[in-house]
Amino acid sequence: MGTTLLKIEGLTKAYPGVVANDGVGFEVGRGEVHALLGENGAGKSTLVKMIYGLVKPDSGTMTFNGAPYTPAEPRAARLSGVAMVFQHFSLFEALNVAENVALGMENPPPMRDLARRIREISAAYGLPLDPERLVGDLSAGERQRVEIIRCLLQDPKLLIMDEPTSVLTPQEVDILFHTLRKLSSEGTAILYISHKLEEIRSLCDGATILRGGKVVGSCVPREKTARELAEMMVGGEFTTTDRSGRALGATIFEVKALSLPSMSQFGPSLREVSLSLRAGEVLGIGGVAGNGQEELLATLSGEVPSAPGTVKLHGQDISDLGPNDRRRLGLQGAPEERLGHAAVPNMSLTDNALLTGTVRRPLTRKGFLDMTAARLFAEEIIQAFDVRTPGPHVAARALSGGNLQKFVIGREVLQAPEVLIVNQPTWGVDAAAAAAIRQALLDLAAKGAAVIVISQDLDELMEIADRFCALNEGRLSAPRPTEGLTIDEIGLMLGGAHGMAEAAQ
Amino acid sequence: MIRLVKRPVPSKAWSWATPLIAVLATMIAGGILFAVLGKNPVEAIRVIFWDPLFGPNAGYFRGQLLVKAAPLILIASGLAVGFKAGIWNIGAEGQYIIGAICGAALALAVYPTESAWLFPAMVILGALGGFLWGLIPALLKVIFGTNEILVSLMLVYVAQNLLAYMAFGPLKNPEGYGFPGSRNLQQYASAHNPELIAGTGAHWGVLAALIAVIGAYILMHRHIAGFRIRVAGEAPRAARFAGVVPARLVVFCLGLSGALAGLAGLFEVAGPSGQITDSFNAGYGFTAIIVAFLGRLHPIGILLAGLLMALTYIGGDMAQLMLSLPSAAIQVFQGMLLFFLLGFDLLTNYRVRIGRARA
């Protein structure tokens, strides 16, 4: 890999109550694709934010391209040749591609020249993109290309990518990797953050593994198995989920030709979604976020009523019932957004237990709150789902994402639903907590509940779902048994590569 | 350098301490203001805060305290429920006027018939008038998506014009020698809202205010409906997930606060004020907004804040009279109270750190 491009030594950054990075050191060579591996909260984000000038280290040194490197702000980092593609895009949906790119530049050239440059770069790196198109009309994969091209226009020496594949279909991932390998062969180093181990094994030349803010190891990912990498990340034995002991019963939940106009300007509308679910079954719904997942959860949970006859539970039409009436009949949901949707950030866990728990649990008497019962219910959730918190009086916003997610899932599971619908149940959750949540969903199914898991994480769906269907632009594909389903077939179900045929060659 | 660091959990202690600190800061800043105006600050503060309660003529002023505090507390209790849900009724003044007109109109229509049913009927009409006036911004919001802040506020001016029209027109006292204003309800036994215990100032409105405080406390802190209202204010999507129908919530909150404001207006017109005149409204509907926030949107806090605000009204009047302080200075003084409260409120959610950031 030749000479060292970026060298980091003893980098430390502490926040009140937590040391995010503790004496971190590693090297990235020119043209190297280097992975940063670690669970959520291991310190990966803080580390790259320091490299990109967003956060100042408390101590430690960085050397970039042979010179001391202390970026005061992202602009300084970009001038030195460091570019970053964030997990969450910062794009304006109402502007076109070229305008969005221009907004991120210090001295944007005239729009016509810029559009030409965008076309050149997109052709050179196999990332087709029309500079005139509105970003709001683009798929997640295409939006990511806007961000990548924005970076490439600066001719970076180091490109940082934070969880780039979480929003892509498998085919789009192939194309992205193709681009990244080309960049690497031209001498651009890539710092690649992910917790998808197979991707890292196929793409990266080296890896640094972080746990609890410290470097706990480094390796050449190709020489390790995914399991070994996972165990280095978690720092212990990795438990696999147990999906035994389930028997499928009668069909209890049916959705027929459910259509719903889009809830936001650029959001998709649901089109003729149909599915049916048997007791004890886990149905996985895959797809890139923004293809109708939120809309589907909202309408199935009862937040948004649908046309008569579209949603049936035990043969009873529940299309026009609100969330609490559906809970009474045994249908529970857990939305993707934890803070502000599944839970109220400023309220205590006891209050958050009340949020959905009053219908199936005796937490009220004639409408009056029984705070003791609510606190006991919250404690029961904390106990049963190993939620790490000082107690039920703590505000939801004080919990880490994974802990709050365990609380939210626990709250719904402990109400013994007959149908449970969860959206992105392990998004942003560390591996151990994610495994616990998946097991809880399987256990629930083993007791005879029907479970719908909406997730972007295809590995997760393969692990727990009996049948798989894809949600793409508001349309739900016909379900297929997960057994024997290949990743390529899934990719095609997910809508392939969004018009990327030419680049795939 | 001073920095603000967000607290992981809002501080309980500060949320109780900030109103007290705000009152103290208002006294200090107000004292400076009065000193600049050439008055003795200590004396001015004493006249405003001490004399009405313990001064030589305190006997009279203590009665006034309840008379002034009751409408503020009654209105603020209703407003606070809506504010907790993020529904901003700024038009309580208008609902207060309409409530007074509706109740008084009934009495004036049946004058001089004496009946035990008249006063209760007036109370119901007063509440109904305020409720319907509050329903206008609610329905416009639900159906057309209008902003309830603007609509409710503008309806205050509509109500004021309606009040002037009533005072000079349909409700004018036919035996009033051409003077504007209605008959005085204080002289109409069946319609009068009398002082229940002599010398205390306690009329039916004071009792209603107490009931409103207790009712609001039970609703907001003991009942699932109040819990959902609080959730709606904190996280609207979570509220929908918990089964709250936003349209119903808007109607409930604006209707409730309108009805309570209407009640306050009725008790006022049938009691202390006695008459529908074009200047009948005294700004209680707007001051109640300050009271609601000063009381932390909590019923008990509102009770105390209403009394405190009434005190500054009475004390302010006294200061005008005895120290010839301009009335604008008193209004600035009341404004400071809200300003300091909102300012110190920051401490509930943030910690102040002094020193350079170790970024």
Image (tube, coloured by chain):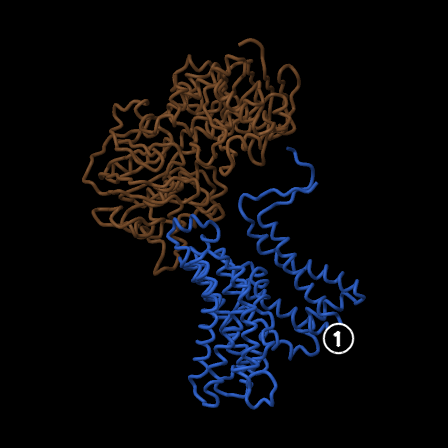
Question: Where is A292 relative to A326, above or below?
Answer: above
Work out whether residue A258 or residue A111 is closer to the camera in this orientation and state it.
A111
Q: Colour of chain B?
A: blue
At 61% across and 58% down in the image, what residue appears? B19
What is the total number of numbered labels drawn onto the structure image? 1
Residue A317 in sight from this viewpoint? yes
Work out whether residue A478 or residue B64 is closer to the camera in this orientation and state it.
A478
Residue A312 at x, y = what percent?
24, 46
Residue B272 in sight from this viewpoint? no
Question: Where is A476 relative to B318, above or below?
Answer: above
At 61% across and 27% down in the image, what residue appears? A109
- Which quadrant of the rendered structure holds the N terminus of chain B? top right
Mark 1 surroundings: few (<14), some (14-19) or many (≥20) residues within 10 A: few
Work out whether residue A120 or residue B259 is closer to the camera in this orientation and state it.
A120
- Most extreme residue toward the top, as rendered? A2
Residue B115 is drawn in which quadrant?
bottom left
Residue A98 at x, y = what percent?
53, 30
Tell me the residue that label 1 is attached to: B322
Work out whether residue A278 or residue A272 is closer to the camera in this orientation and state it.
A272
Residue A173 at x, y = what percent?
41, 23
Q: Colour of chain A?
A: brown
- Which quadrant of the rendered structure holds the C terminus of chain B? top right
Residue B46 at x, y = what percent?
72, 69
